[in-house]
Amino acid sequence: DAVKTATCTAGFESDERAYKPHITLVRKAARHTPVDFDEPLVWHVTHWLLMQSEQAERGIRYNTLHRWRLG
C-alpha cells in the first residue's frame, strides 16, 4: 500500500493489479540454463530508478521517469 500511496501522491495513475516488484536480468533468452552460485551474489546499488515500459513498434521501450541516488 505504501508504494501505491506514494506513486498516487506523485501524480501517477493507480493500477488495480497486484504489485509484484522484480528485477529483469534477461529478456528473450535463447535457452534456460539454471545458475548455481557458489557464493552469495553481492550487488552494490547506487541508484534507484522508476521505469515505465511501453509497447513500441520494435518491441518494448523503457523510459526513466525518475532517478534517486542512494547513500
Image (tube, rainbow, N blue to C red):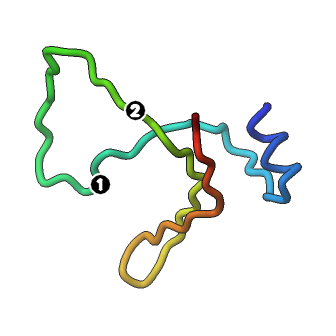
Left or right of 3? Residue 60 is left
Going from N to C along the chain, the mark reached first, 2 or 1, is: 1
Quarter holding residue 51: bottom right
Quarter holding residue 59: bottom left
Residue 19 is situated, as x and y percent measured from the top left of the image, at 64, 38
Q: Please, is residue 59 above or below residue 22 in the view?
A: below
> Residue pushed farthest right?
9
Q: Secondary structure at mark 2?
A: loop
Residue 30 is situated, as x and y percent measured from the top left of the image, at 13, 54
Q: Count neighbours of disc 1 (C-alpha within 10 A) and say few if under 14, some if 14 to 19, many if 20 or more.
A: few
Residue 4 is situated, as x and y percent measured from the top left of the image, at 78, 41
Dot 1 corresponds to which residue? 27
Residue at 56%, 51% in the rendered image = 49
Left or right of 23? Residue 69 is right
Which label is found at residue 67?
none
> Residue pushed farthest bottom?
57
Q: Count neighbours of disc 2 (C-alpha within 10 A) and say few if under 14, some if 14 to 19, many if 20 or more.
A: few
Residue nearer the viewer, 56 or 36: 36
The N terminus, quarter of image: top right
Mark 2 and mark 1: span between their CA atoms?
Answer: 22 Å
Residue at 85%, 59% in the rendered image = 11
Instruction: Please state which amino acid type lies under the numbered disc 1.
Output: Arg
Instruction: Please state which amino acid type lies under the numbered disc 2.
Output: His
Dot 2 corresponds to which residue? 44
Q: Please, is residue 59 above or below residue 25 in the view?
A: below
Disc 2 or disc 1, which is closer to the eye?
A: 2
